[in-house]
Image (tube, coloured by chain):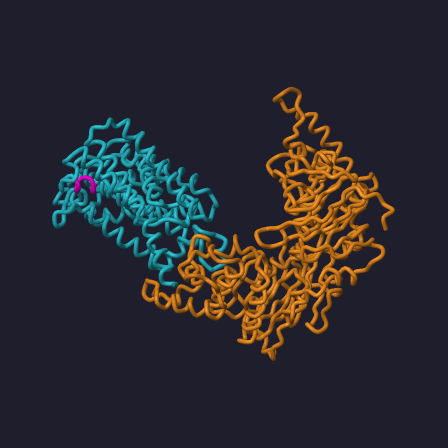
Amino acid sequence: MEKSVSTISIIKNYLDKGKTIIALIGLIIVFTILSPNFLNGSNLIIMSKHVAQTAILSVGMTFVVLTGGIDLSVGAICGLSGMIAGGLIYEGLVLNLFGITIYFSVPVIILISLAFGMLVGWLNGILVTRFNVAAFIATLGTMFICRGAAMLRSNGKTFPNLVGKPEFGNTGFPFLGTGTIIGIPVSIWIMIILVAVTVYISTKTPFGRYVYAVGGNENAARLSGIKVNKVKIIVYVISGACAAMVGLIISSELVASHPATGESFEMNAIAASVLGGTSLAGGKGSILGAIIGAFVIGVLNDGMVMVGVSSFWQTVIKGVVIILAVIFEQMQSRKID
Amino acid sequence: MSQEEIILEARRISKQFQGTRALDSVDFKVRKGKVNVLIGENGAGKSTLMKIIAGVSTPTSGEILIDNNVVHYTTPSEAVRYGVGIIYQELNLFPNLNIAENIFMTREIKNNLINIDFKRQLQEAKKYLDKLQLFVDPATLVNDLRAGQQQIVEICKVLSQNARIIIMDEPTSSLSQSEVSILFNIINELTASGVTVIYISHRLEEIMQIGDYVTILRDGHFIAEDRIKNINLQWIIEKMTGNNRIQRIESNRTQGEEILRVEHLSLPKGNGDYTLKDISFTLHRNEILGIYGLRGAGRTELLECLIGEQPAMEGSIFLEGKKITSKDISGRIKDGFSLIPEDRKNMGIFQNLSVEKNMTISSLNLFTKYTSIRKKNERSAVEDIIRKLQIKLSSPEALITSLSGGNQQKVVIGKSLLTQLKVLLMDEPTRGIDVAAKQDVFHICNQLAMQGFGVIFVSSEMQEILAIPDRVLVLSGGHLNGEFTNTAVTEEKLVRTSALDLNASDQGVK
């Protein structure tokens, strides 16, 4: 008897988690009917490349939101990380004092950019924990700081033509955004690997448990011996790293970095998390859900473009979908209660 | 004893909550211009009866008479029209608004349809404050007032609604000694001016001092009523507890060596005052040490000092003879402490997680190999605890919120058992759980002591304190006021040692 109860609950659980997938499949069917080219292989790959950006951001965002926080700085971190990488390739690290310019190889540049993203995330975490600043405000502040810093880096101009020079040993940057491995774009590989790693972290490791525990009940978490501040700082660092990665991918894809890159990306990331069933109150949700949420947004965007919906309407429809999804979620959870 | 006029009478009031009878045909007479005390143990039905009299809830059957007329009201605002006002234990003020705004909330004085006349509100508020001798500016934010002053604002609010009958639900629980004597002066003045007070309290000493009449409830039944001057403490205790004695679990435990020693522990408040002052005690293996005290005595804070939740703590703690150096909770848990918090919902459980994940959250290192949690090991440890503590559930994967309060509490205890436990700190472990589960918790306490753990058992329920611990410490106003062995302790001793020393504080107040 116990067995049947748990089977039913597993099925229920599955359907519950599958809601967004069902919505995704529905959207794909609708767009396939409206535009026969929709399901064609090259279109799917293009679409996945778009989705990868939102998906990577939403992975970091979901960690933060699961602890009950929010990260508004991710879009600005995209812009800043692109500018850091772009600047290091385009003009190198100019040390005026010694009259020299240092050029780094692309892997080092990628690591430096990621480190910057993590540094901003660490700052977010410190502000939220040590200084008790509300996450919304702390990350709003760092959002402005990063965006301003990105603009300052080049005086608002674009770093163009980031192919690098063989004599400086800094070629190869475009591979990240334009290269393929076994026919699949690198950015999609990055997304897949990131998802695999973070799904593992969030479901199999003690740290993953702590993230859910902190979001569910911070007091109980502290009394259970969880280092709540440490957990919170780490999730912001993860989010910062994810954002920096996206900034790199975009700069690489365009072979140029522009300081306005990533504007309002944080909203897409939050939308993907929420569509995937993550509760902004914390403690509920999943990485996989967020990825599916990112796909819903991506399919919606690209599908509407292919069908010829005006971009103004696209924005309106996106908003409606997000609200409907949350209303649906609310009705579901009330029924369970 | 009927020479005094009865202003309000509750007749044969019953209240049924799904399945349980909170009140069973209770009679309650309230005499005009007197302090009418209502007492009973937790769960006796005091709060339910007060909510009915205040119009917050409606009785399943029975009637209420005011001035000998049957009245029907179903909301607090209707009750106010009959002159019945209530002051809750948890004050219901808006800390972000000033005194005058709080007093006239929803009954604002306006000079036209929409415009609040702040000036007149302040003047009116001042009148009430003066009357109760609280000499502060009525434009002061409530947040800036001390607990006792906030209480007086609540009384002003009720008076401004022309209340003739004021219900006070444990009004002294968050007050200091001097604030209590100020409150008592106010109550005396109110009753002298013809206002009737219904007074609910756990503090028996206080009741003997302020009350005129006392009504006793037990398990939802009316038990007795009398004039305070005709009775004594012993009588109240007997009527309150009746045959409700909790059976002591007899076991041939022999006390082991010392496991915990606390020396000169103090917890400063920051304003020169102390929440806890110079507490020293020891705990042994195989021993259950009870800590008794009224609300505000510092029971919870003492446990918080031990678990590392109060960084401002002064003094030393020795565990197995070694001085504790860890500063935070995770360090103390590693040392061997674990706390079962009083407020299970807000401090104890993770409502978003399953039973299993709730239980293992403090001990995941036991099941983790390299980086991942080994499901199998985790599950077998959880099932072991479920068996040992007899937790009733459909599956370890069920959400903890699907369990009854008692079973949730067992999961929280299980969480502690999975740590490297040496000393278990239990803060009101039977709060909000049913009778059968209470017995289980007592058995678990006993089992743990048999296995060699040290158990600290904090409770405000006298019966529990008399039955469960081997030794009892009594806290009062942050001081360690008494220590008794199980054989020596009586209700009366608990009442006497836990009471605030009102006489001592009276000297500090004019």
Is residue A301 one of those drawn in magenta? no
Q: Position of residue A215 (x, y in %)?
A: 43, 50
In the image, A68 versus B38, the foreground residue is B38
Which image quadrant is residue A80 in?
top left
Residue B262 in sight in this render? yes
Along the horizontal axis of the image, is B101 left or right of A204? Answer: right
Q: Quadrant of residue A46?
A: top left
Between A235 and B269, the one nearer to me in the picture: A235
Q: Residue at x 38, y 63 (%)?
A: A1
Residue A161: x and y in percent read 16, 36
Q: Is A128 located above or below residue B411 in the figure? A: above
Query: On the picture, is B153 further left or further right than A32?
Result: right
Residue B450, by quadrant, is bottom right
Q: Position of residue B1 (x, y in %)?
A: 86, 51
Residue A116 can be seen, yes or no: no
Which shade is chain A?
cyan
Give whichever of B221, B446 is nearer the camera: B221
- Image point 14% across, 49% down: which residue? A181
Q: Would you say the magenta stretch is mainly helix, strand or loop? A: helix
Residue B62 position within the rendered picture, expressed as x and y whole percent measured from the top left: 69, 46
Q: Is residue B371 above or below residue B505?
A: below
**From the viewer's perspective, is A105 left or right of B236?**
left
Q: For chain B, what colour was chosen? A: orange
Magenta stretch?
A44-49
Q: Is residue A47 magenta?
A: yes
